[in-house]
Amino acid sequence: MATKENSVNLVLRNGRVIDPALGLDAVVDVLIENGSIAEVSAEIELGAEKLSQFEQIDASGKWIVPGLIDMHVHLREPGEEYKETISSGTQAAAAGGFTSVACMPNTHPVNDCAAVTQYILEKAREEGSCRVFPVGAISRGIEGKNIAEYGELRAAGAAAVSDDGRPVMNSLLMRRALEYAKTFDLLVISHCEDLDLSSAGLMNEGPVSTRLGMRGIPRAAEEVMVARDILLAELTGSRLHLAHISTAGSVALIREGKNRGVHVSAETAPHYFTLNEELVCSFDPVYKVNPPLRRAEDVEAIKAALDDGTLDVIASDHAPHTSVEKDLEFEYAANGMIGLESSLPLILRLIREGVLTPLEAVAKVSHNPARILAIPFGTLRKGVAADLTLIDPEVKYTIDVNRFKSKSRNCPFDGMEVQGRAVMTLVGGRVVFSAS
Ligand code: DOR
C-alpha cells in the first residue's frame, strides 16, 4: 500500500469503518484534512483542486477503526532502557496498531512527581511513534506508605494514578488516594493483589501447582482486593479502574458492583483469555506473569465477562524483560509478558470465536479506554484528531518475536498461527507505521 510519509491530507477509500462511538459498521470513505477527521461517508467527492492535495489510499478489504489504545503498558524508561525505551515501546505500539498507550509508573525513578511525568512526555514528543499518557504513582516510590502529589502529577500531564506492579496494601491509604484523586478528577488504577496471600507464590494455586510442587497464588489474593477496592470506590464515589483481571471470582464481584451502581471499570489482558495455568507444566518462564495464568474455567469466565460488558477494556500489560531476567529457573524469573505486537490478532480471534462482535471488540481497545482515561480519542467523529488503524482481518501468519520492534522478546505467543494484523497506523493523520 503506497503512502506518503507524514501526510496529513488523506482519503481512505472503501474501508469497513467500525466505530462503536458512532454506532457505525459500514464500508465507506474517510477524509482526513489537516490531521483531523473531516468526513466519514460513502463515496466522498473531492473537487479537482483538492484532488491534487489529498493522497488516496485504497482500503478495500481492510477495516478502518479508531486508533487502538492500550491503557496498560510498561515502557521501562526512565531507568531500564535496556528492556524498552519510549522510542522502542511506542514503535512496537504503532506496529501493533496502537495510537495511544498509557505507561505505568514503576520505572526508575518511579513516576511519582512532575519531573518524571514531564520527562516521559518530552521524550515521547521527541522520539515517540504514538501518543503516550503517563500514569503517576498512587504512593511515593510505589512504597504504599505516603500519597504522591496528585495536583502536581495532574498539572504535569498524568492521565491517572496507579502503583501497578504492586498493590496498595493499606486500605486507609487506598481510601485517601481515591478521595484525593477525586479532587483532581484523576482515575485510580488498582493492581489487585493481597501480598500476604500471594506471598512467594509462583503460579496459580490449585491441583496443577500441587502436582508441580510450586508455591501457589490463590485466586482469592486478587479477589479480596477487588472486593475491597469496589467497596472503597463506593464509599468515596471516586473513579476506579481495576487492572489485569484474571479470575472468575473477580469478574463476579465486578459484575455485582456495577449492578449496584459503583463507578468501577475493569480490564483484562489477552493472556488471560487465551492461555491457562497448564502451560506452566513446561516450566518455561515465558508463562510467568502476575497475576498468574489461571484455570481453564477462569479463561471462560473472562471471555463471558468481555461478552457481557463486565470487563470494559482489553489492555496488554506489555511488560518487557530481557533474557537476563527471564531465562532463569521459573522460581527466579521476572513476572511479565510483552503484548503490544500480539494483542490485536488475539482480540480478532475473539471475534471469530463469537465472543465479541467487531463493534464490541473495537470498543474494548479504543472507545472504552479513551472514555475511562477521559482522553479525546477512540472515535472517528468529525473534528477529532485522525488517529486510526487499518487492519487486514484476513492475513494469516505466524507470530515471530524476532520481527518485533520491542527491545524484549518475552512473548508467550511466539510461534502461534494467527489471523489479522495492523497494516497502517495513523496518529493525527501522520503515518507512524505501515506494513511493508
Ligand atoms: O507480570 C507483571 N509484570 N505484572 C505486573 O503487575 C508488573 C509487570 C512488570 O512491571 O514487569
Image (cartoon, grey):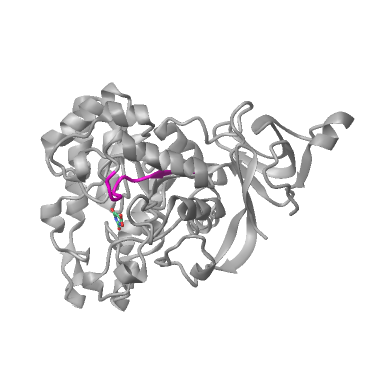
Report the quarter where the C terminus lies: bottom right
Q: Residue at x 58, y 33 (%)?
A: 23
Q: Is residue 430 left or right of residue 77?
A: right
Q: Nearer the viewer, residue 393 or 191?
A: 191
Q: Residue 112, position in %: x, y?
A: 26, 39
Q: Is residue 302 left or right of residue 202?
A: right
Stretch in magenta: 100-110
* Whether residue 106 can be seen here: yes
- Note whether 148 is above or below 200 in the view shown: above
Q: Residue at x 78, y 43 (%)?
A: 56
Q: Is residue 48 left or right of residue 192?
A: right
Is 67 part of what is drawn in magenta? no
Q: Residue at x 11, y 34 (%)?
A: 172
Q: Residue 250, position in %: x, y?
A: 26, 47
* Whether residue 308 can be seen here: no
Quadrant of the picture in which ligand 1 is shown: bottom left
Q: Residue 148, position in %: x, y?
A: 22, 34
Q: Residue 116, position in %: x, y?
A: 33, 40
- Note whether 53 is above or below 208 in the view shown: above
Which quadrant holds residue 143? top left
Which quadrant holds residue 322? bottom left
